[in-house]
Image: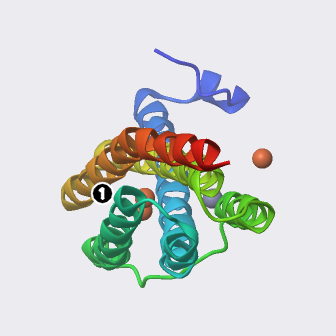
Amino acid sequence: MKSNGNGKSATAGKSNNKKAEKQNTGVTSEQLQDFFEDGLKDLYWAEKKLVKSIPKMIKNASSPELVDALKSHLQETEGQVQRLEDVFASIDTKPVAKKCDAMEGLVKEAEGIMEECDPGGMMDAGIIAAAQKVEHYEIASYGTLAAYAGILGHVEAVSLLNQTLEEEKAADDKLTEVTGSAVQLMEMENAEH
Ligand code: FE
Ligand code: ZN
Ligand code: FE
Ligand code: FE
């Protein structure tokens, strides 16, 4: 049995020890719950940010494959905002957005790339690189939150978060596929010169 780190427990009876253990467990899951809710708020902000940012990527993209991939993921992202609201509801919590510094940085980086590149293959390649960083951040975040939800016994949240996790993975794969069309575009541009 693990010591509870409390010097007083040495003199405590069996029932007191049990109580101390219960309290320890309680504090831990409460902290995990806080962490979980914080993560949801962070992602809620991040997804809303993306609903505003992906259209800028679409506007700057050239290859029809990339435009299609971004458009369909924009639609999915709108659904993910809604799905996070369902996650909040499933744990009887109001949906609150809390600024995600990481997503703000990733979007800033994407905007920087788009400012530097002329439209065409290079721009497309830059957008794909930036967008894949976004997808990987989301995959990490949803993966962690789904795991926490599982530990906390939030069954409905696990299923909702995993649905979005799968969409993010598929979006990332799609972007990898589309890289070929950006490279083709660059080759065509080079041939013209
Ligand atoms: Fe997303
Ligand atoms: Zn964040
Ligand atoms: Fe960077
Ligand atoms: Fe995404």
Closer to the camera in the image, 24 or 114: 114
Q: Quadrant of residue 147?
A: top left
Closer to the camera in the image, 100 or 145: 100
At 44% across and 59% down in the image, what residue appears? 63
Q: Position of residue 17 (x, y in %)?
A: 48, 31
Q: Quadrant of residue 93?
A: bottom left
At 47% across and 65% down in the image, what residue appears? 40
Above or below residue 41? Residue 9 is above
Q: Which residue is mark 1?
A: 164
Q: Position of residue 145 (x, y in %)?
A: 42, 50
* Amino acid type, label 1: Thr
Q: Position of residue 35 (x, y in %)?
A: 55, 55
Q: Secondary structure at mark 1?
A: helix
The answer, for residue 28, to whether it is visible in the render is no
The answer, for residue 94, to whether it is visible in the render is yes
Q: Is mark 1 within 8 Å of ligand 1?
A: yes
Label count reads: 1
Q: Position of residue 21 (x, y in %)?
A: 47, 35
Ligand 1 sits in quadrant:
bottom left
